[in-house]
């Protein structure tokens, strides 16, 4: 039986999208007969522990490492945050704001700089006790790869293959501060010297990493979906779609003025309301985001009637998936910045198997998430207010969703159960 040591700062039961890729890989690797140990960070103080990914397997062991400085815990506790899912989301928001302030200093490390040494210590204990065939680390944060690189060196064996997975890019990440980009690139280069293989999620990432590390084996394993989480996805995608009343448009994810901005949707609907093409009873926008205040500000600036938009803060991921499937359209937002064209988040793959038509808006014309939606026949792209207005007028007049023609074979290739077979 081959053994894998996973290194990831986020992992189930953390109910965050960053934990999903690792969690679902482990789920299917266990079924293929691997023995797995996972070193992760103890995030229960920061994020809801409501993930629907479970590991009830004798061949799996989780090592959650405490790392948050007590002073930070006291600062949060002084805000009288209660121990509930919504409160944990609030804590997570405070934590993330704190991390953003650290970015100019620590870059992609964030507060997980405090996790590095205890994680390395635990990893050395495991390496002394057992012989592992593979070490797999998941970025971000960069702390995961730093820990893995040190464990690779500690093992002093070429027989252990270290696979560095880039769910997001490191120094080439569009969110990397320009002031720290040079330093990040240097650290990245030093850390990845001992990597046996590098994984990225897109062609864009492959090109960037190939140019930097031509001597390395680099492959693409996209984000994907768990077919067991969406058991009826083929049937859902094959069903004929009808417009309901009210038309429900749902968005789940981050909102920001700079990168994921819903203003095209808001302004378009505001005009359609004003011109009498729709009324308050004919459409409903549901937004689930941690960036409540920013979304509210964008909404107010658009002059859209607030009565048709509901902004909610946190719901567990499994409920977010349920809300997506109960909708008529799903809104997909991404950065319109050229640096963000390679963003292929896990959410877009959940969208394409939901059986719900997708409206991609505001992103760069070369964005890969937009291309995925179009290539799989699961959505339409509205680049600006004019194209969004044309789209809504067309479906309102024709009463048909003309663009939704999912390619089942293409979509199936993104199944996590198939992806893990390409890891080794």
Image (tube, rainbow, N blue to C red):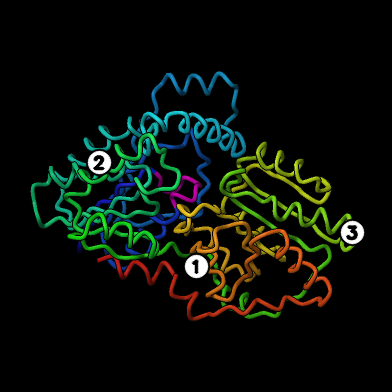
Task: Out of 24 and 397, give the one closest to the viewer.
Answer: 397
- For numbered disc 1, what is the local secondary structure? loop
Report the Cα–Cα distance between label 1 and label 2: 41 Å
- Which one is earlier in the sequence, the residue at label 1 or at label 2? 2
Q: Residues within 10 Å of mark 3 (few under 14, many from 20)?
A: few
Horizontal side of residue 24 vs 194, given as left or right: right
- For numbered disc 3, what is the local secondary structure? loop
| Label 1 with label 2: CB-CB less than 8 Å | no
- For numbered disc 2, what is the local secondary structure? helix
Horizontal side of residue 238 vs 349, given as left or right: right
- The residue positioned 37% from the left and 39% from the top of the image is 108
Looking at the rendered image, the disc whose residue lies closer to the viewer, 1 or 2, is 2
Tell me the residue that label 2 is attached to.
186
Tell me the residue that label 3 is attached to.
275
- The residue positioned 33% from the left and 62% from the top of the image is 206
Question: How far across and down, in percent of the image, does residue 180 sit?
Answer: 35, 35
Tell me the residue that label 1 is attached to.
228
> Hey, which quadrant is residue 214 in on the image?
bottom left
Give the extent of the magenta segment.
10-19
Please determine whether, in this image, residue 160 is positioned above or below residue 63: below
Task: Out of 156 and 260, give the one closest to the viewer.
Answer: 260
- Which one is earlier in the sequence, the residue at label 2 or at label 3? 2
Horizontal side of residue 176 vs 83, given as left or right: left
Quarter occupied by the N terminus: bottom left
Horizontal side of residue 71 vs 370, given as left or right: left
| Label 2 with label 3: CB-CB less than 8 Å | no
């Amino acid at each position: 039986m081959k053994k894998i040591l996973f290194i990831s700062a986020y992992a189930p039961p953390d109910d965050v999208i960053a934990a999903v890729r690792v969690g679902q890989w482990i789920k299917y690797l266990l079924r293929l007969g691997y023995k797995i140990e996972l070193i992760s960070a103890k995030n229960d103080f920061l994020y809801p522990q409501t993930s629907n990914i479970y590991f009830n397997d004798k061949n799996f062991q989780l090592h959650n490492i405490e790392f948050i400085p007590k002073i930070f815990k006291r600062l949060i506790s002084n805000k009288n945050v209660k121990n509930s899912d919504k409160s944990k989301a609030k804590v997570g928001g405070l934590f993330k704001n704190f991390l953003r302030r650290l970015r100019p200093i620590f870059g992609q490390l964030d507060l997980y700089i405090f996790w590095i040494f205890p994680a390395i210590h635990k990893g050395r204990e495991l390496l002394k006790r057992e012989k592992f065939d593979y070490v797999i680390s998941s970025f971000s944060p960069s702390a995961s790869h730093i820990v893995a690189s040190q464990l690779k060196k500690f093992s002093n064996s070429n027989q252990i293959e270290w696979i560095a997975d880039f769910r997001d890019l490191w120094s080439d990440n569009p969110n990397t501060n320009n002031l720290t980009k040079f330093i990040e690139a240097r650290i990245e280069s030093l850390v990845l010297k001992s990597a046996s293989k590098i994984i990225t999620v897109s062609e864009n990432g492959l090109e960037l990493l190939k140019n930097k590390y031509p001597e390395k084996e680099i492959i693409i394993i996209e984000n994907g979906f768990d077919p067991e989480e969406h058991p009826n996805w083929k049937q859902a995608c094959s069903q004929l779609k009808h417009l309901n009343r009210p038309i429900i448009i749902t968005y789940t994810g981050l909102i920001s003025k700079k990168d994921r901005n819903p203003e095209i949707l808001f302004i378009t609907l505001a005009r359609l309301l004003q011109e009498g093409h729709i009324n308050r009873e004919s459409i409903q926008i549901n937004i689930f985001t941690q960036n409540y205040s920013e979304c509210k500000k964008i909404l107010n600036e658009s002059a859209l009637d607030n009565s048709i938009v509901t902004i909610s803060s946190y719901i567990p991921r499994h409920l977010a998936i349920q809300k997506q499937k109960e909708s008529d359209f799903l809104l997909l937002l991404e950065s319109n910045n050229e640096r963000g064209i390679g963003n292929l988040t896990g959410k877009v793959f959940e969208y394409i198997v939901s059986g719900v038509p997708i409206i991609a808006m505001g992103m760069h014309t070369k964005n890969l998430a937009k291309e995925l939606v179009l290539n799989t026949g699961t959505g339409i792209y509205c680049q600006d207010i004019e194209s969004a207005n044309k789209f809504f007028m067309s479906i309102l007049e024709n009463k048909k969703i003309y663009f939704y023609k999912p390619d089942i074979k293409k979509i199936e290739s993104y199944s996590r159960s198939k992806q893990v077979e390409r890891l080794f």
